[in-house]
Image (cartoon, grey):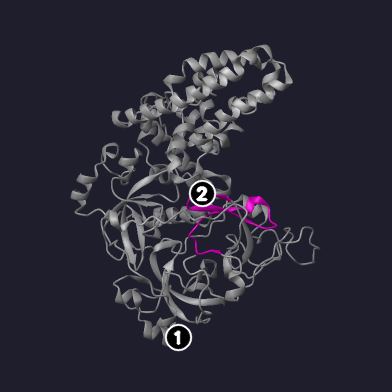
Amino acid sequence: GHSQSFPSRRTGFKVGMKLEGVDPLHPSLFCVLTVAEVIGCRLRLHIDGYSECYDFWVNADSAHIRPTGWCKDTNHRLHPPKGHSETDFDWQLYLQSTGSHAAPPNLFTDRTSCEFSVGMKLEAVDRKNPGLVCVASVADVIDDHFLVHFDNWDDSYDYWCDSSSPYIHPVGWCEQQGRPLTAPQGHPNPENFLWEEYLQETGSIAAPNTAFTLRAPHGFQVNQKLEAVDRRNPMLIRVATVTETEDYRLKVHYDGWSQQFDVWSDSDLADLHPVGWSQRTGHPLEPPPSPPQVRQTGVCPTPGCRGVGHIKGAKYTGHHSAFGCPYSDINMRKEVLLPDRLGGERAVNMGHHGNQSDRSENGSESHLQAALHQSVFLSAMSAQPGRDLSLCWEQHRKLLPGAAGVTAETVRHWSIQQVCDFVQSLPGCEDQAQQFRDEHIDGRAFLLLTQRDIVRIMAIKLGPALKIYNCILMFKHAEETDQSHAEDQSRAEERNQSHIEDQSHAEDQSHAEDQSHAEDQSHAEKRNQSHAEDQSHAEDQSHAEDQSHAEDQSHAEDQSHAEKRNQSHAEDQSHAEDQSHANDKSHAEDQSHAEERNQSHVSVLWEGLHFPSSHQSDLNF
């Protein structure tokens, strides 16, 4: 990462050396690894006994690689090469039989420790679905890094982080923030989950507040240059530019490439480097492609691509056609699904300490889960275009018609057809609606579905499944306990208060003139001025709304108010305003929702819905 921007020396790792380390696609597993390639301070590691398509790149100072024998010394399970039995695997014999050497221990970076220990409980953001904060445990600790595991879920959702991560919180954080906490999978009463009881039942302790050391926001600025590993072709480092920032994430644009390749990254990601890093560490840097490149015969047809790398990873060093190209339209459009490296061979308990987590499912199910996991892994971890996570829930709440009265109570009475119609109205879920009808799922059954049911029993892809599951959560939270309802109420009132000021200010400014100047050109500018205030107010509430405006028919008018209003809209509009301002106090929606919006059929309310975790760029990887 940035803590030591420039490694002090070239790495001593050599091709052929063997070591132990974490498999990034199965974060709870330690594997037998071989150095397959060294470029500067970066290593391509091969998982012994498996296809090269599972090779992965790390920096030589990575926290996730260890010398041979480390697992044995620290009581971790080592997943042996294919064909070797775990109980009989012996490093000395293996090195002899393969004629290879262990990487010397002095090549590995020493690290500090942290206050977290295995079994401690915390609240953590689900990185696959950042609107959710869930009950979690520390499943493993290596020096200053630890593995977050979601209670009663399988390990495909696990991730490593350190104590400064913005995605972890102490027990009780959600309650303090007035945000819903997702209970462990299969909890008997998830709506009324209580930490006190749960800690007692599981005989565990909460991670101490002092263990959490939230890092300062990154300080990157838009238009700054950096050097970034190419996420679609990680053997390359490219010249890149910061195009958007949040406190702990930034959007990276690869210079000279289309914006469709832009990716969101965590600011502490080890794949981001300061300008000059490649040169200092002896790594080639890919310059931006010059616009119309002269096509050489036999080289990849994708503009800007030199034919280096392959969509299937290190198994192939290059490609000549769109089929193998990491940047071709066909590969951008489809999910590239590597078969799970472990297939159905996963043992019942993959942890090194068999705690109560639910790992005893049958092979085909965990295979499906791992495959789903993998399809999203490459992009979802940090390509989330969602806003800052704390806004995320608020944003869902604004976009979802909680305030328009669609609560679980309403949904409970839906027929099978209504459930089907509703699912069909969600962008990207059109194809899934039929399955709900086939399974005879009515409103009552719909509310009982878990994320696991939707993914596994109905075999729905993770993207649409998360979207549908989020809706179910929304419905339930729309009628949450009185306490959170009261909070919402007062928050809504605060919001309305400032809104009403905005509103009356806007009306004084331009409403009177609006009537008389409906056709007047200059009116558009005046209206725009006061509209800009409302607009910025709306942006404070939620960026997401802007995102959905464009697609949402009934919203498109509000959006381009200023131009369209000059035609026949003046009457409609002032009528809608009179109507909806009267109701303004009764709901926390923005004033710009016209009356039709409040009363129309549910499906309209959902038309422009965007979940941060289900953008095209993430899921059609």
Quarter of the view holding residue 519: top right
Q: Nearer the viewer, residue 361 or 594?
A: 594
Q: Secondary structure at mark 1?
A: loop
Marks 2 and 1: which is nearer the front? Answer: 2
Number of marks in the rendered image: 2
Is residue 56 rendered to the left or right of residue 131?
A: right
Q: Amino acid at mark 1?
A: His
What residue appears at the point 37 percent right and 38 percent down from the top-left corner?
449
In this picture, which residue range is highlighted in magenta? 244-273
Q: Nearer the viewer, residue 290 or 508?
A: 508
Is residue 558 rendered to the left or right of residue 351?
A: right
Crowding near the residue tagged with mark 1, few <14, some 14–19, many ≥20 C-alpha atoms within 10 Å = some
Crowding near the residue tagged with mark 2, few <14, some 14–19, many ≥20 C-alpha atoms within 10 Å = some
Q: Which residue lies under the disc numbered 1?
A: 101
What residue appears at the point 58 percent right and 13 percent down from the top-left corner?
575
Q: Which residue lies under the disc numbered 2?
A: 246
The furthest residue to the right = 294
Q: Amino acid at mark 2?
A: Glu
Q: CA distance from mark 2 to mark 1?
A: 44 Å
Residue 151 rendering spot, x and y as whole percentages: 31, 51
Q: Quick check: 16 above or below 490? A: below
Q: Secondary structure at mark 2?
A: loop
Q: Is 221 one of the magenta-colored residues?
A: no
